[in-house]
Amino acid sequence: MNTALSAKTSLKQQNQELLERFSAKESVTSLVSQRCRFVDELLIEHWQSYQLDCYPIALIAVGGYGRGELHPQSDVDLLFLIDDSLPKEAETQLGSYIAFLWDAGLEVGHSVRTIDETIAQGAPDITIATNLLEARLLCGPQAMFNTLYDRVREPLFWPASEFFIAKRDEQTARHAKASAFDLEPNLKSCPGGLRDIQTVSWVAMRYFDASCIEELVAHGFLELDELEELLECQGYLWQLRFALHLISGRDENRLLFDLQRQVAELMGFKDGTELAVEQMMKRYYRTVRRVMELNQMLLQLFKRATLGHTSALEIKKINDHYQRRGAFIECLQPERLNDPVELMQLFLHVAKNSNIKAIYAPTLRSLRRARRAQTTPLMENELCRAVFLEILRHPRGIASLSLMHSHGILSAYLPAWRRIEGQMQFDLFHAYTVDEHTYRLLRNIDRFSLPEQKDEFPLGSVLINQLPKKGLLVLAAIFHDIGKGRGGDHSKLGAVDAQAFCDLHGLNKHDGRLVSWLVENHLVMSVVAQRRDISDPDVVADFADKVRDAVHLSYLYCLTVADICATNEKTWNNWKGSLLRDLYFSTQRVLARGKEKPVDIRARVREHQGKAKKELLRRGIKEKSLDLLWQRFKADYFLRHQPNQVAWHSEAILKHKHDEALVLISKHTTRGGTELFVYSPDKPKLFATVMAVLDNKNINVHDASIMTSKDGYALDSFVILEQDGSPVSQLSRIQGLRKALVKALSSDTGKLPKFKKLPRKMKPFKVRTQVSFLPARKQGTSMMELIALDSPGLLAKVGDILYRCQITLLAAKITTIGERAEDFFMLQTADGQQLDQTQQDELSAALIQALTEPSS
């Protein structure tokens, strides 16, 4: 054990030395090799001390260790190659040797096999076969290793064509599990990660029997500048992985949020206009995009060489200069792409040919060369501008723009686009870089037109075909976030850029103003729908004034929905869809009515009561009982609830004969979520109690309407959703939730329960608690906006503070944006008045203290 302890100490000392040398900016390639040599020496030295060199056993490094690449905490993969069954004493010594390696702190993956067993294991398993390609003898019989080496390279052991197909399919499956632009990317397995570089190397090893990727240049599969680019990309990914291992102290390949800041610091990034972590991640995202392009091109070339499928691809002439080869576009005279206009024409042909999905590898190589040769933005060329507008106006223009983005032509055309490539925001809301988010937004606009999307986007699928010029929406989408990362209001910066772009491209003033307006206001509809009371006619009227006409409204709706859906995969849900549709139709009615008389509130109350009463009488409810119940309700109740909700609540209340609270949970979705209704004698901290139960049940609250009857009964209604944005629908879940709420509301305890710990992903984020009061729209009320870290129990704590400050909550709109809670509350004093300045200050101070101090 002392020997293992000594080895463990040596490994720790070497890690410290690696840390110091890494911090001093020594080449990561040198450090990776040095780590490998250190482990080699350790293994060989103790191989002899355990007297294993006395037996016919070959100690072979495989996998990444076999390549001679070892990061500080990487696994050490070993093959113990034996001639035949081992003597008992050899087995004992080998077992002791493996135990020593583990005790020394090495993560060892090992197998003990004969040559025949090794080949038999590798024949059906592409992973084992790949590891064997990289085998390296550490010590033991050279002849035994040579035999294995030759057997692995026999034509019938994974023929090059089968090996290529297996590695390509393996990569496709791996890519399907993750995006290159994940918030916490896996440096090895994400698209464009280290595995993509290794895949090219592995295919080359099998096809050419190459020992390293550099040999591809000699074989004509890789040009020198492409090799340099690939090695540069690998070097940066290695730096990230090396730093990640040093900081985490484990074989960690995911750039986790709680490690990203430390990795950026170790790599020498400093906070500036952009945070150090954002600078680091921007370079990462740009790097993986370059790797993805090179990987795509090289695997396509390997496919031609190994499978010989070029003749099998259908060839269809486009014109004298271009043809379609299968699903690829091919330029017949690659030198033509040096002309900027021809470069743009290539993508116009993509738009005009729906069968084209990608660029043929030789053409892609020429495009990459032509792209690097451009010295001025393509949009400064008048003829290029004409082609771009043609792409923009084409029904398949977005498909072409997507390909332009993938291959760096959009940034070559539009300099402002280059600034947002790889631009990430260090938060939990924006799951993608700005350029990737915008690309997904564009694809969403395309999705609106697909028949199969009508159920998910019922209104968007109608409006998209009614827009006068869809290309203007596409332009607004391109510019909506283009101002991010510069400091200042990105919406205003983007609007200026959009207007200048439209002027340069000769769009008429009306179209230019529309695009600029959409960019500047692209967040407005989302904010109003999710954070304001859209049942308030004044809120809708103000929004209608901003929108001005039905055309602006339709464009803005489509842009808003596509934008929300592109932010992250969990953001869009039926609740948000319902809110936006409601706001759209309410605004449309206001615009159609113009400045005529406002809605008659008393008439709306009578309308809702009349419809609800008709349904309840049909169900056998006595009119007298109903009238007596409704006399206890304030007019606001009937304004804030639809007739079907009034009928549901009223019938349940009249049939409720128990002393305990009445808790109703809808079986059907209400406004895209599940409605929770609580009826009970009003009591202190009722809202806080309900919020505490919901939080501990992992239920999200999105809307709250808090009111009391004239005789002091709570009539509280909430829209709730599961964590994944789906309605609460499982019967056992509903029953458990109802039981927990009834029990909590029957309890007299005044204490809030213990809440869950802050999740790991949330810990790196700091959100300053901010409380602000907005101009009141309704007499006797105050509107408060709260921004805070979305920590467990947040709403319960807010409810508790409101109670302590003797403030009554009337309504709440709950919005979670990643790690940020941005919630809106309608409040009044206990005697039904607006909060004065002193009360506002006291409430603000109490909330900031309670939500800032973890102990509270």
Image (cartoon, rainbow, N blue to C red):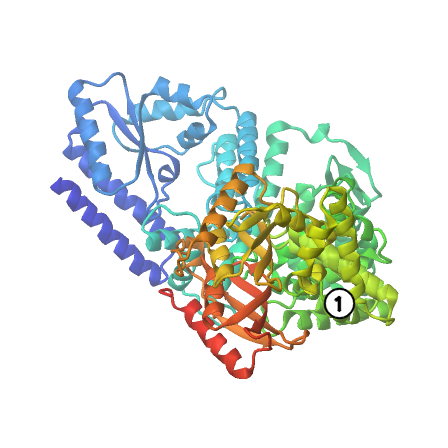
Q: Residue at x 47, y 47 (%)?
A: 740
The outermost residue toward the bottom is 837
Q: Position of residue 235 (x, y in %)?
A: 45, 53
Seen in the picture, residue 165 relative to 629 is either above or below; the reply is above
Residue 39: horizontal and vertical position, in percent? 27, 43
Horizontal side, residue 663 vs residue 517: left or right = left
The residue nearer to you, when weighing 463 against 194, is 463
Tag 1 secondary structure: helix
Give percent across and percent down for residue 724.
Answer: 56, 47
Q: Quadrant of residue 483?
A: bottom right
Q: Residue, x 77% and y 66% (percent of image)?
A: 601
Of the 4 image quadrants, the one containing the C terminus is bottom left
Q: Residue furthest front?
A: 624
Q: Does 206 sit left or right of 322 as displayed?
A: left
* Residue at the image position 68 percent from the left and 56 percent from the top: 628
**Total marks in image:** 1
Does residue 334 sit above or below 201 in this rendering? below
Percent of width and height locating residue 482 = 66, 65
* Three-letter amino acid code of the residue under disc 1: Pro
Q: Is residue 26 visible?
A: yes
Q: Quadrant of the N terminus?
A: top left
Considering depth in this image, is 342 or 701 the residue closer to the camera? 701
| Residue at left offset 23%, top offset 22% | 56
Residue 332 in view, yes or no: no
Is the residue marked by circle 1 packed among few (<14), some (14-19), or many (20+) residues within 10 Å?
some
Q: Which residue is tagged 1? A: 537
- Determine the image quadrant of residue 617: top right
